[in-house]
Amino acid sequence: MSGYCGKSGYYLKGLVYTVLMMLLFPAFAFAQKPAGTYKITFLFGRDQQTGLAEPGTTLYLKKLNWHSTEGTTVDSATVNRKMQAVFKGLTYPLDLDKDQERLFTAGQYNLCNSDGSFFSFVYSPMDGRSFKETFEKSPGGQFIRKGYNPKKLKENDLMNPRAFGSRAAAHLAAQKHFPASLYAVMSRFEEKPLSANDESQLPDIADERLFYTGFGKSIIDGFLDKFALSKESVRNMAIDYLMENKYLTHPKMKAAVAMECFRYFTSSVVMGCEGSAVYAAEKYIIGNESVPLNDRAEAAYFVTMNKGTLIGSKVPYLQLKDTSGNLVSTNDLMGNWSVIYFYSDDCIHCKIETPKLINFLDGYKDNILNVLTVYTGTDSLAWKQFVEENFSTMNPYVNWYHVSDIGRDSNFAVDFGVASTPKMYLLDQGLRIRGKGILTNTLGRILEDEEVLNKKAYQYLATIFATGETGIGNKELQAGINKALVDKIYEGISSSDESFQRLLRQTFTYLYFSDRYADKEAAAYLGKKYVLQMPQRWDDTVFVSNVGSLLRAYELNRPQSKAENLMLYDISGNPSELLPDDGKVKVLIFYRTSCGVCKEDIPLWKEAWRKYGRKVSFTGVLASEEQFGSWKKFVADNALEFRQLYDKDNIAGLADHYYVETVPKILVISAGNTVLVKDVPSAELDAELNRILKK
């Protein structure tokens, strides 16, 4: 019978594997030809006892490597009654093609007891020559080579700079007396850390002896530290610099460097470094058979869980049902800053983080913020109860979406790398990831930094578009100058999609909502040329759509343009021209019965009509498709005594000729049907008519 064999079966199988390894290891080890012997003696001395060792204590000689901070045991010895520990064995030539972690070869070694390491030394010869050394414990508690004489140095005297004199003096001695030693390699990097601008250091990086040291790993880490805060492209160049070293030829050494680059960036606390970890994994690890299988599996798993959610990448598509059973997708978040918050009702950390998130959202007022909460559990009742009890805020700046995958129909855990909760993402307006695996305090800092950047951008734009306007000629000239400035801005950021979208969005917003003609003209120019004609460069389709609507609003019924005369219907159901040929200036007021602002402004309209009604033709126009009866009642209830029209069954196509998506909208038109003023605020209608009629 095959398949599951139970715990006892697994135990038996593991025991068999262990016995086989114990039997095979000596045969494997001694199949390699030794080159010499080692005898390493440690003298403790009873009068200097500090608890490191007592008679009968077992000590271990451990060989360091890049994969283990503790090292691998090569030999053990027991402290005798004379307070001595003696290690004896065979030495071997260094050969990275073979598994030599338990053999005495060139490398770095630690003396350890059950509590940890307390002495380190190096063995440099690659040919496996014999090694005999005795170390004795000094009154100061340090191990010093017996017979130490500063005038007759040996390499391992340098491993204890205090006994030697100073670390700097030990470095100088290493370069002078033992330039080819492992200690000399270490000292060269300590004196001058690895730099991408110094090719003289490349041979030392590739020294195969570094594989069995602890400081070899630290040399690589120290180099990568310089690039942790750099852009991903710069970090990746640093990885390439290490991996494409012409002296780094041994596959095992290359694999070790690649894995160190990968692990450095996977463990970095700097957000975004996972992109460089993915880069190292895909380029140098996953398809490289020289890399151990378990390391390749580790890298492949990391890529699977992180590649789709790298900082700057488009968020994976996710569509789930909310508490009412309606489908909600990530596309519904586009157009504003958004947070995706993965949580579970039985997660202790979620219960701590969720109140912090709610407290932050209660006070958030910078922009509209979408919040998509994703329940990762499988209990529908627990989910809805958690939502009701925990996600409560009345902040109008926050749009909430609560979804779950109770039936496990999606692949959210892999797509978003949700191995544990809580996990939070921050998305920009184009659904690109700006924060990953963050907590509330980091979320606040990122959004605050973004707001600071926006303010700086608007200050910059206010400076370069600063102008005064006196007369139509100067307005047109300044509009031309502003359009040229828009082109200059584009030229400076055209190569970067991120900068392109960020700064052009800010520039359009600044110019469009300015009250200056030249700025609005430049906004229209920018919107047409760099948004509507380049939709492929914009992730935020909502922004592109909004620009289209705003430009259409700007172009329709511009001052000095001809207003379109339409045939509409009056309150009695009779056809009536929108712009009657009565020789008067005309005021068109577009409104909806459901518009609260319109209702508040009605007294201002009526006041202007009573004051100018003999000289000006007032017309109210219904800007929505409503039941005729409800509209007629609205007119009567609000005592709108001036002429009222509506587009019956949308026959005239009112929305095609007049932009009425936002109301109230007021136009002042000449007797000859030329638009004089557009978008007059209700509060300024009286003053505007007074100015026009005085001309």
Image (tube, grey):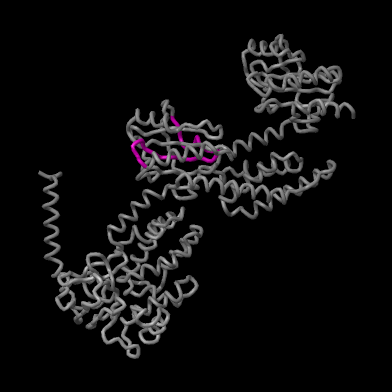
Can residue 98 be spotted in the picture? Answer: no
Q: Quadrant of residue 87?
A: bottom left
Residue 594 is situated, as x and y percent measured from the top left of the image, at 63, 20
In magenta segment, residue 204: no
Up-down relation of residue 596 to residue 261 (above or below): above
* Residue farthest along the bottom direction in this orientation: 151
Q: How many marks?
A: 0
Up-down relation of residue 465 to residue 336 (above or below): below
| Residue drawn at 35 percent across, 40 percent down | 347
| Residue drawn at 68 percent across, 28 percent down | 659
Give the residues in magenta. 327-348
**Front residue of 185 and 395:** 395
**Front residue of 161 and 516:** 161
Q: Quadrant of residue 290?
A: bottom left
* Residue farthest along the top direction in this orientation: 572
Residue 607 is situated, as x and y percent measured from the top left of the image, at 79, 19
Question: In the rendered image, which quarter contains the C terminus?
Answer: top right
* Residue farthest along the left direction in this orientation: 1
Can residue 204 be spotted in the picture? Answer: yes
Left or right of residue 626, residue 475 in this image: right
Residue 304 is situated, as x and y percent measured from the top left of the image, at 36, 49
